[in-house]
Amino acid sequence: MSSTTGGHDLGYLTGGPRYLPVAEHGLIGDLRTSALVGTDGTIDWYCCPRFDAPSVFASILDADKGGSFELAADVPARTKQFYFPDTNVLITRFFADGGVGEIQDFMPIVDTEDSREVDRHRLIRRVVCVRGSLPFRARVAPRFEYGAQPHTARLAARDRVVFECPSLSLSLTSSVPVEVQGQDAWSLFKLHEGEVAVFALDRAGGELAPRPCALADAEELFDATVRYWRGWLHRSRYRGRWREMVHRSALTLKLLTYAPTGAIVAAPTTSLPEQIGGERNWDYRYVWIRDAAFCVYALLRLGFTEEAQAFMRFLSDRVVLRDCPAEGPLQIMYGIDGRAELPERELPHLEGYLGSAPVRVGNDASGQLQLDIYGALLDSFYLYDKWGEPISSAHWDTISELVDWVCENWNQPDEGIWETRGGRKNFLYSRLMCWVAIERAMRMATHRGLPADLVHWRQVRDRIYRQIMDRGWSAERSAFVQHEDDSVLDASLLMMPLAKFISPTDPKWLSTLDALGEELVSDSLVYRYDPQASPDGLRGEEGTFSICSFWYVEALARAGRVPEARLAFEKMLTYANHLGLYAEEIGPTGEQHGNFPQAFTHLALISAAFNLDKALG
């Protein structure tokens, strides 16, 4: 897949800072951190040395103060961007009057026991002139600690610049001459057909000795990186109709994996707005328990058992039960290293994407009560026990504790799946997932012959079922609703048949599906809920939620409305960006909003593709 983005000239050519659309980016990474590369050749988001570390480049959040790594043809040019086939190596091409050039961006995957090389986090940019001749221009302008910490830049050698601040040092090596001006490094160079230039940005200092990156080294690392990604993707078992999109989603999920722990971040970015100019800007560089079942399901279905095992190990070993009955024994999210403290703060010195303040780091939603996470976690254990390997006795003890807690606490208000900040309510989805938690634990206990208070668990499970059917059903709307004894619709209820709570052809469910389609669906795109009908404590509006759109596809397929489901799925694919990537939301005219790319959306795409393939036969 590629995209023509005519007129994408760099800021220094058009005179002033500017912001690319969120969708005009590709993602590269090394399984520890990642970077966004725009179709104009600029890296405008990069955190080092981890996903959740302070940014080095953040011009996507402030074009003036955030910092960036610009690299492009120094003449007006059209651009196209694509991934080297079956890899996460990103290529940005420039088409100008004098010739054609391209940038090959990648981060080598270090498969070694030498922690020093792992900690280098090398970011390589190969510039190739493929036709004619082209002048190029580079500007490397890091801004450490989200642009708040000053640094120095010095020319350590003819081909090396060192950027230093108290918390981090970076080394830039180049095969073309580089100059230092103030805090930045610059280079102007011209390439003729067949010529190559290389820039490599490494973490430096301490035990990390400077390492050159000659043209031959860069080519060797390029080939090794291509081999790694193709070797990894070769393990996929998916052979269905949408192989390209499913495999791109799989490669994206792998990029969002933090290899040391197996954690998968919800997205690699923070504070990309759900609405331009609005306040719905959150930090997604953490691990949501809610994603667990979807992660395990997608990874196992695709054949990536090692990744599923690593993620389950993260959930089992690092997510520690806490003695805090008011907020529950689990948090809704954790750091990529398993830490529980994720204090939220604002960065007032950054203007935000297109002026969308505030920019936030950390996430206070980690302290919310969200009862649905217990169903997600227990469903992931159930799926892994079924398709992966049997759970251990220690894990069963933890599961039993969680189920006992759910049995005592399911019938209380919470903040719900959408992490609203308008007060706790009796969300139907939370009740549904508490039912899932108990039901999946009962299945495991029965299948494995494990000790459990099945009589008590069954009584509570059935009580939840009856309450959902009685108080979660609105005769007025002929539909299940967001809150008990209310009439507001909510797209999270698309999970009811997917979670096997209700038959996908049950008359009550089909009526609900019709109601959701009439009120929350727009050209296959699904809104989460109506903030006017159900205030969530935040100002502004939001776009359609891509996860819900793929849930809708799956619900239609399971309900037997297969042609409708296929059309909705094909329409959803047209809303992906030129690389097959999705942000969290899609706006009124098809633009992508929110953090990018979002793991949950790609997980839902994989699930929808699998089940639609199955329905089509």
Image (cartoon, grey):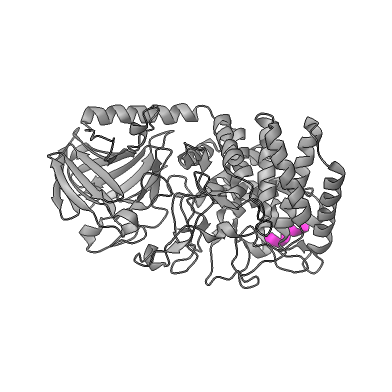
Picture coordinates of residue 599, whole percent (x, y)? 52, 47
Secondary structure mostly seen in magenta is helix
Tell me: residue 602, above or below residue 195. Answer: below
Picture coordinates of residue 340, whole percent (x, y)? 54, 51
Tell me: residue 448, above or below residue 581. Answer: above
Residue at (58%, 33%) from the top-left corner? Answer: 309
602, 60: nearer the viewer: 60
Residue at (70%, 48%) from the top-left corner? Answer: 375
Tell me: residue 226, above or below residue 400. Answer: above
Residue at (41%, 45%) from the top-left corner? Answer: 50
Q: In the drawing, does residue 131 fall left or right of residue 5? A: left
Residue 207: quarter of image: top left
Q: Quadrant of the C terminus?
A: top right
Residue at (43%, 69%) from the top-left corner? Answer: 277
Q: Is residue 515 magenta?
A: yes
Picture coordinates of residue 507, whole percent (x, y)? 82, 55
Q: Is residue 434 magenta?
A: no
The reply to whether residue 582 is visible in this rendering is yes
The reply to whether residue 241 is visible in this rendering is no
372, 5: nearer the viewer: 372
462, 520: nearer the viewer: 462
Q: How many marks?
A: 0
Q: In the drawing, does residue 394 fall left or right of residue 80? A: right
Picture coordinates of residue 223, whole percent (x, y)? 33, 27
Q: Quadrant of the N terminus?
A: top left
Residue 204: quarter of image: top left
Magenta highlight range: 511-516
